[in-house]
Amino acid sequence: MKIALVYDSVSSAKLTAKVAEVIAKVLRDKAMEVTSVPVGDAKHLKIEEYDALVVGTPTMAWAPTKPVKEFLDGLDASKVKGKKAASFDTQMRSFISGNANKAMESRLRALGMVIACPHLLAYVKSEKKVYHFLDGELQKAEDWAKGLADALSK
């Protein structure tokens, strides 16, 4: 199975990229072919040549980052309809942080893609303007990726 994993990571700690790396490793360990790229490098990907798309972003102003929105808006529904998809985001644990996954899943469904499994929320915190994961979040990402691999294999 060929999977495109496209993500944006904006903090200096690159936490969303770290989640993407964990997901890519688990999927590769499950014998899946994964092309993992930052969203800025995704223009060359022909998503129609992949079996599934996984998209990740930090939640910024209650939504995906602008590059991720533009990437999703640039996909051609006629070329991705029926393909499997999943999303993940990193966000602060707060009732006002919003959830980028909702917007991403809505766009993926509008393109006719099938959501393979419930999305992943990886929580982060800021200490003195330096971002870190909450305890257990990378393990949660690994467990989520195992579930995603099972869902994609069906």
Image (cartoon, rainbow, N blue to C red):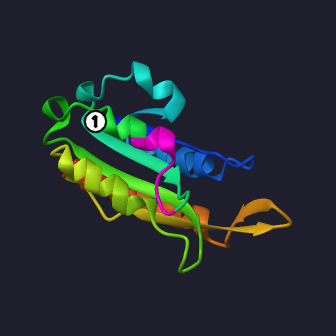
Residue 122 point in image, percent of width and height: 54, 64
Residue type pointed to by label 1: Met
The percent position of residue 5, horizontal first and vertical second, equals: 42, 39
Q: Quadrant of the N terminus?
A: top left
Say which residue appears at 41% left-offset and 46% top-offset: 55
Is 18 included in the stretch rendered in magenta? no
Residue at the spot of label 1: 1
Q: Is residue 19 visible?
A: yes
Q: Nearer the viewer, residue 62 or 37?
A: 62
**Residue 38 in sight in this render:** no
Q: Residues within 10 Å of mark 1 (few under 14, many from 20)?
A: some
> At x 59% / y 61%, what residue is drawn?
138
Along the line of sight, which residue is nearer the eye, 29 or 45? 45
Q: Position of residue 6 (x, y in %)?
A: 45, 38
Q: Is residue 31 above or below residue 43?
A: below
**Residue 73 percent location from the top left of the image:** 32, 38
Q: What residue is rendered at 13% in x and 42% in y?
A: 82
- In magenta, the rendered stretch is 62-69
Query: Is 87 placed left or right of 13 in the picture?
Result: left
Residue placed farthest to the top in the image? 44
Q: Nearer the viewer, residue 110 or 116?
A: 110
Q: Residue furthest bottom?
A: 95
